[in-house]
Each structure stands twice: as C-alpha cells, then as structure tokens.
Amino acid sequence: MKKNYYIGLFFALLCLSSCKVMTKIYYNDHSKVDDGEIWGSNLNSFFIKSESIITTSSSSVHLRDELRIIKDKIIKNGEVVMKDDQYYDYALVTKSGDTLFLNSAFEIWRYQNKKSKLSISNVREYFKNP
C-alpha cells in the first residue's frame, strides 16, 4: 500500500515539474562595464559568465505564448540579417530552446538570422526588474 502511495506521489511531482513553463531571461546591464554593449555580431556574449549579465526566469504561459507569436512574425516578415549593427539588452531562451534577442526600447527583435521592428508592449511587464 505504501509503495503505491510513493509511486503516485512520484508521478504527481514529475508531472508538476515537467508541466512548468520556463523562459530564461538574460539581461545585459552594460552600465556595469564601459563599452559593454552586446552587438548583433556577438550575441554569444549573453551566455558567457560576466558581472554585467543578470539572469532570471519566468514561468508565465502568457510570456511563452507571446514569444511564440513574436517568433512567428519575425520568421514571416523579418529581414535577413547580413551585418547586424544593432545592440541588444535581452536574450530570451524558451523551454523549447528558441532564443530571441531584444533591444532596450522593446522594438527590435531578432530570431536566428532575421530581425524585425515590432511594437509589442504587453511583454514589457516581464522586464521591469530583470
């Protein structure tokens, strides 16, 4: 009887932990380092350990859904990036592994080799205090 209880508890915990939506948010606080901007030509800098990179996460389903919509818009309407002279303040990595980049004005979005200017104000709430 106890064995069945523990097996049931294990599967319940497994389901709860795997059902949690997670978006990892990387913020580049370039005020901490002179000339610390991350340019489109060097986006891997978000993922190198640095005192200027602040990392947090969100389990919001709303944010996940918004990022999926944004990604689809970029794929459909975005311009192909040959040389990216834009700098980015945020990197967003979804649970599925998609990575989107965003500037501080919340207007320039990049996904893979495409970028687009989008005014998506309803995602700002997730970035007030990274």
Image (cartoon, rainbow, N blue to C red):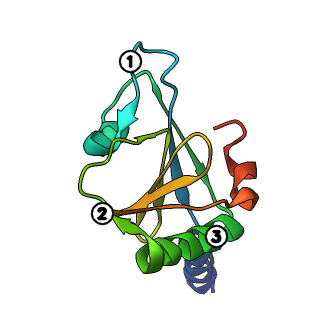
Q: Relative to residue 18, is residue 114 drawn left or right? A: left
**Amino acid bearing label 1:** Asp
What's the residue at 42%, 15% (across, down)?
Answer: 33
Residue picked out by circle 2: 113
Amino acid type at mark 3: Glu
Question: Tag 2: residue type?
Answer: Asn
Numbered label attached to residue 35: 1
Q: Position of residue 119 (x, y in %)?
A: 66, 59
Residue located 52% across and 17% down the image? 31
> Spatial distance from mark 1 to mark 3, Cα to Cα?
31 Å
Question: Quick one: SS at disc 3?
Answer: helix
Q: Are marks 3 and 2 in contact (CB under 8 Å)?
A: no
Quarter of the image where the N terminus is located: bottom right
Q: Tell me the quarter of the picture where residue 128 sits.
A: top right
CA gap, disc 3 and disc 2? 20 Å
In the rendering, which numbered label is found on residue 66? 3
Q: Position of residue 58 (x, y in %)?
A: 63, 55
Q: Is residue 76 in view from this perspective?
A: yes
Does the rendering let one see residue 20? no
Q: Nearer the viewer, residue 54 or 5?
A: 54
Whether residue 35 sits left or right of residue 41 in the image: it is: right
Q: Which percent across, then down, holds residue 127?
A: 67, 44
First in sequence, mark 3 or 2: give its number: 3
Label 2 crowding class (10 Å Cα cut-off): few <14, some 14-19, many 20+? Answer: some
User: Marks 1 and 2: in contact by CB < 8 Å?
Assistant: no
| Numbered disc 1: secondary structure | loop
